[in-house]
Amino acid sequence: MEYLGTGYFLNIDNRVYWLYILSALSIALYFIYKNPQYSYALSKKIWWHKSAKNDYLYFVMISFIKLAIILPLVTYLFSAKDVSLLVSLFLQDNFGYMQKVNYSREFVVVLYTLALFVFGDFSRYILHRLLHTVPLLWRLHQVHHSAEVLNPLTFYRVHPFENILFALRYALIFGLVTGSFIYIFGASIGIVEIAGANVFVFVFGVLGANLRHSHIPLRYGKFIEKIFISPSMHQLHHSTKYTNKNYGGILAIWDYMFNSLVHAKKDEIIEFGLKNKKVHSNVFNMLIEPLRR
């Protein structure tokens, strides 16, 4: 059953963990109560659209591919632990032994958690932007943007080669940060957690992360949206008009700094999908078509 993706709903580190889904649904229902015109977001027209059906099937397929192929491959290439070890050894060989900085463990844990979050989010922004600007990578990323309607499983509508790129990015950044912290502070580092999940992952999840891939245009207000990406902002990124805007993962400050930030206009009607109206007719097409040329 794990190969069918069921574990994603039970793992608190995953976007579609049941608590995050329940939280998003609660927020959506309250939003619709206040804005009845968006009740169509829960309609059969959205959830049983052909594009949505492809999302559901693709989720099962990509879950199998990740467990059977991608995870073993990335682990074979290099893991986060391998990178952290190489970084700490490199720093020691080139800068010599460093007397461990005498800070409380609590301070180091908070600093380490924050560093992982900031560097991880920035690297995600960079890779995401490259997926849009490098033609070869865009051919892969089009699979994600070809969704004509959005639902939480659209998050997993990602080509396997793109999954490999993100897995390598994670291993590299996690390893660089961890190796540096071990060199400076020693091995007594850890992550601030809530219920076993990274605190940022947990807070992001319960505050409606799954609404990013939905038809609920929840906004935070322009000031907050210069710091954090709202569901509405990510929905704009999925539109045919603003696909080259709002690349950020959680933080919007990178988009603000590099001039790729855009806010939704009041009552703006957006169309999801690709500008060229290209769609993937089935799951097999999503996997094979980007590799054909």
Image (tube, rainbow, N blue to C red):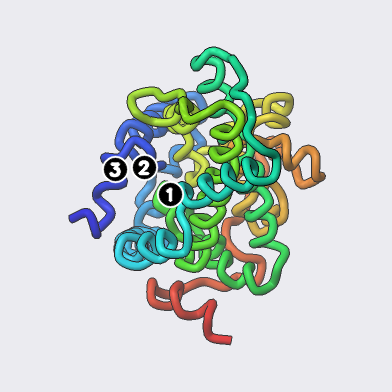
Q: Is residue 110 left or right of residue 48?
A: right
Q: Quadrant of residue 231?
A: top right
Above or below, comparing residue 141 to residue 184 in the picture: below
Question: What residue lies at 58% left-to-right and 14% top-to-bottom?
Answer: 103
Residue lying furthest bottom in this view? 293
Label 2 sits on what residue type? Val
Q: Closer to the N terminus: mark 3 or mark 1?
A: 3
- Cα distance in 3D space between marks 2 and 1: 11 Å
Label 3 sits on what residue type? Phe
Q: Quadrant of residue 287?
A: bottom left
Residue lying furthest left in this view? 1
Which labelled disc corresponds to residue 9? 3
Q: Closer to the N terminus: mark 2 or mark 1?
A: 2
Q: Give the image location of residue 36, x and y in percent.
A: 48, 32
- Binning the other alpha carbons within 10 Å of mark 2 as few (below 14), some (14 to 19) or many (20 upward) gives many
Question: What residue lies at 62% left-to-right and 41% top-to-bottom?
Answer: 92
Of 198 and 107, nearer the camera is 107
Label 1 sits on what residue type? Asn
Say if mark 3 contacts mark 2, CB within 8 Å.
yes
Q: Give the image location of residue 261, x and y in percent.
A: 75, 42
Identify the secondary structure beneath mark 3: helix
Of 192 and 252, nearer the camera is 192
Any part of residue 50 in sight? no
